[in-house]
Image (cartoon, rainbow, N blue to C red):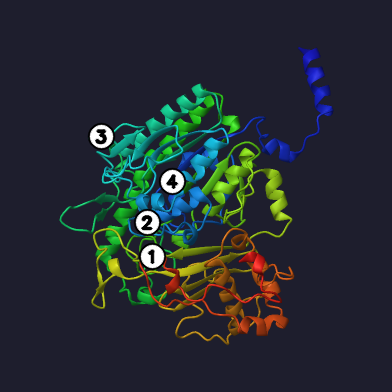
Amino acid sequence: MCRRLFLFLVALTFVPWSYAALNDRQPPAQKPNFVFIMTDDQDLHLNSMQYMPNVLDLIAKEGTTYQQHFCTVAQCCPSRVSLFTGKLAHNTNVTDIIPPYGGYPKFVQQGLNNDYLPVWLQQAGYNTYYTGKLMNAHSTANWNNPFPAGWNGTAFLIDPGTYNYYNATFQSNRDPPASTPGQYNTDQVAQHALNMLDQAYAAGAPFFLGVTPIAPHCQTIFNPTTPIPGFLPPIPASRHQNLFPGVKIPRSPNFNPNVPSGASWITHLPQLNSTEIDYFDNFYRSRLQALQAVDEMISTIIDRLTQHGLLNDTYVIYTTDNGYHMGNHRMQPGKYCAYEEDVNIPFYIRGPGVPRGKTVDFVTTHTDFAPTLFQLAGIPLRSDFDGSPMPVTGNAQEQRRNAPAPDHTMVEYWGTGGFEGAYGLQGINGSFTQFLNHTYKSMRIVTNKYNLQYTVWCTNEHELYDMTRDPSQMNNLLGPSASVNATPLASPLNRPLSQVQPRLDALLMVLKSCKANQCTQPWKVLHPDGDVNNLVDALNGEYDAFYTEQPKVEFEKCELGYRVQSEGPQTPNYYGTNMAEWT
């Protein structure tokens, strides 16, 4: 025994190692596996993650947390399509949850069913499996017309039973849809996931497994007598229905504020009354309770990966499709907005080479997801990706930290912004919030020195927030009472807003219709000579005239979907060249 210990210690002296090596798992010799878990409508800023100990202990603490991760469209189906294609919604043209502008039929119509992540992974030698919700309007009417391409094994939740927490409708492999009365939706998804892990292990090939429960999405009731479904609080599993007594929605500065905030119709919302707030608090507890079955599922998946000896070769990823607001800016429960509650979302990853217990502030988005998997799997990146690989391994994170990197993301939305719950159809000045147009183009710029959000609505109203000083987005610096000649932004953006806004508008002009590397390098589009890499560079006084003469982001009309003819100018001026190679 002593001789063995001696030889072991001697061997260690000849093995180079570091603290980082102790924290990083080594990349696998063969292609890694992927287990991708995505919830539906889960918030980050309302603290739902604090009620999911298994996610935090088994994924976050064992991997890296991306605290500046964003969806690029805050709605279920468009967000999922962007995630699985690596393209922004204006490039997929899937911009809604139902036809004619969105849903599974639009996804098929756009030719994306044969040109998205599972198809690409299969071409690279992966087996692919999926259980849960794929996208909206994937239903009992079109489940096999056509089948979703690219999957070796499936158990899809499909409409109209997708959002039934009990008695959901599943469609597995090539079998016809079947309802499952008396069974809890999330538990069924969990069991399908475990069965698929067994199949993947038996097959012996690298695999991708998508696991997408509906929690904490509303229980959605489709009534054949009305086109408007009912959106009610989610239903937790019976074992969880009494958890978290007395827990309430966090009372952040933008929760039911005394002074109206936002822009467009949001500024006209009445302050919530005590009945509504009590209802919201109960709604909030139902969401937390519904997430407990998801959290239990995490431990069973990790246990099954361990049982099969697959855990060390598998990236386990946890996120959601978009965020959620409840009472923020006086709004009824819902999503769709460019506000932080709806677009800044949870994202965690553990796996080979991923630093343990790390939190990073790199700007990442759902359009980066497919490029990230390509890089980790050793697949050449596609030239039409609008995103770029996230820094996952310790080496990649160190390189991102020491090199210029994207500090921005765009968010876009088309159509109406519906509210959920019992009071979701409250009136505003004779109209109904359910039907008010919510189309906008927005962007976030996040660095350790400045942090901004800039939005142009289809009404051509503007919003600008200094997120460092105003993280709750209560003080619109471009609101009706604001002065663009003021200098409210801290150093290094110590220029009047009348000079800062044209730079922001020009950057948004690039992003609102960008394609491929234009989306990750927008400053290079504006300044092809490479002299400008960020907003501080662009604020150099020598560019004042250039930005003053830029066309402005504006809309001709509020549309229900992406109609380029209604979206105003599409191309900015280029500094010193026509930049033909970018167009």
| Quarter of the rendering occupied by the C terminus | bottom right
Q: Residue placed at 48% from the left, 70% from the top?
A: 473
Q: Which residue is at the front of the view, 355 or 462?
A: 462
Q: Which residue is at the front of the view, 251 or 100?
A: 100
Q: Callout 3, which amino acid?
A: Thr
Residue denoted by label 1: 561
Q: Callout 4, which amino acid?
A: Asn
Question: Nearer the viewer's eye, disc 4 or disc 1?
Answer: 4
Question: Nearer the viewer's eye, disc 2 or disc 3?
Answer: 2
Residue denoted by label 4: 113
Residue 61 can be seen in this image: no
Q: Earlier in the sequence, mark 2 or mark 4?
A: 2
Q: Residue placed at 36% from the left, 46% from the top?
A: 215
Q: Earlier in the sequence, mark 2 or mark 3?
A: 2
Assess whether mark 2 and mark 1 are in contact (beta carbons under 8 angstroms).
Answer: yes
474 versus 422 height, above or below: below
Q: Earlier in the sequence, mark 4 or mark 1?
A: 4
Residue denoted by label 2: 102
Q: Which residue is at the front of the view, 357 or 176?
A: 176
Q: CA distance from mark 4 to mark 1?
A: 20 Å
Q: CA distance from mark 2 to mark 4?
A: 13 Å
Q: Residue placed at 68% from the left, 49% from the top?
A: 397
207 versus 78 height, above or below: above
Q: CA distance from mark 1 to mark 2?
A: 8 Å
Residue denoted by label 3: 180
Assess whether mark 3 and mark 4 are in contact (beta carbons under 8 angstroms).
Answer: no
Mark 2 crowd level (few <14, some 14–19, many ≥20, 10 Å Cα): many
